Amino acid sequence: MSFQCEHLSKSFALRGGFVQALEDITFRVGEREFVSIVGPSGCGKSTLLKLIAGLLRPSAGSVVLTAASDDERPASALVFQEHGLFPWMTVLENVAFGLEARGVGRAERHERAMAFIASVGLAPFAHAFPHQLSVGMRQRVGIGRAFVTDPRLLLLDEPLGSLDAQTRFLLQEELLKLWTRSRSAVVYVTHDIEEAVLLGDRVLVLTGRPGRIQGEITVPLGRPRKLEYAVDERVSAIKWQIWGMLEEEARRSLALASREPLPAEEGAVP
């Protein structure tokens, strides 16, 4: 599957006016391509994923999906940083939920779900509930639930953003292994420049309010991707190139935040 965003814009109505979240976004993602999107908070990254997934309607422009006529897989799956597990369901039931929604029989969906649970190292916890798992384990469940339905397009919105550095590194490896075995195209949103480079075939840099694509960089690293590439000189060069696109806006946001008055401490004399 491939898709094209063509002059995509999105605004939201507010009392007395509107706010423009995205403006004139155009890019293409090819079949089985892994595209990272990096940018500061508030530039519309999550809004863009929701537009691609069809959860929001664009104010202008369009998203054009192209798939083989005999491809009956679900069009897309969206994974958020909060992972969104059902607390009353076990790990097995959570991972199998998408298959159940598609009408897959109990035995088959449990078999397929267990295969993914085992692939992310959670087989001993298949019958545990989300509150019994660590944050990293819950994140693996959420990612497994998205992959098990074999979507044509996988949309990942900061799926590893709440994790510590060590857990994040391990889950990057697991994510790449799952994607290598899948048939999905991937759009991966992250604040982490290095992560965007290490995972993606291309990196789109989104900046501004409203958000616009400021640049697009092809990552010259082979597949299968090795996370040891983090110390590769090419990765370092791309990171600095991306930072050059983001630096001015990041410094401007920091300056604005520093001028905001701090809240008074409780009991302090005004």
Image (cartoon, helix red, strand yellow):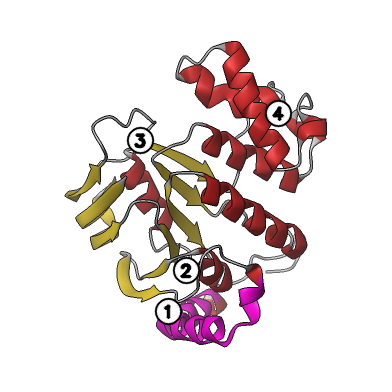
Work out whether residue 61 can be spotted: yes
- Can you identify the residue that label 3 sits on? 75
Looking at the image, tell me whether mark 3 or mark 2 is earlier in sequence order: 2
Residue at horizontal 43%, vertical 63%? 37
Say what amino acid the circle numbered 1 marks. Glu
- Can you identify the residue that label 4 sits on? 91
Instruction: Give yes or no for contact between labels 2 and 1 (Cβ–Cβ under 8 Å).
Output: yes
Alpha carbon of mark 2 to alpha carbon of mark 1: how far?
8 Å
Q: Position of residue 6 (x, y in %)?
A: 19, 56
Say what amino acid the circle numbered 3 marks. Ala
Is 45 magenta? The answer is no
Going by the image, does 18 lie left or right of 196? left
Residue at horizontal 69%, vertical 62%? 169
In the image, which disc is placed on residue 249?
A: 1
* Secondary structure beneath label 4: helix
Alpha carbon of mark 4 to alpha carbon of mark 1: how far?
41 Å
In the image, which disc is placed on residue 40?
A: 2
Q: Between residues 232 and 81, which one lies in front from this camera angle? A: 232
Q: Between residues 224 and 264, which one lies in front from this camera angle? A: 224
Image: 74 above or below 178: above
Looking at the image, tell me whether mark 4 or mark 3 is earlier in sequence order: 3
Q: Dot 1 surroundings within 10 Å: few (below 14), some, or many (20 or more)?
A: some
Image: 159 above or below 266: above
Q: Position of residue 245 (x, y in %)?
A: 40, 82
Going by the image, does 106 lie left or right of 256? right
Mark 4 vs mark 1, foreground winner is 4
The stretch of residues the image draws in magenta is: 228-257
Q: Position of residue 117 (x, y in %)?
A: 69, 34
Residue at horizontal 48%, vertical 82%? 238
Say what amino acid the circle numbered 2 marks. Pro
Q: Dot 4 surroundings within 10 Å: few (below 14), some, or many (20 or more)?
A: many
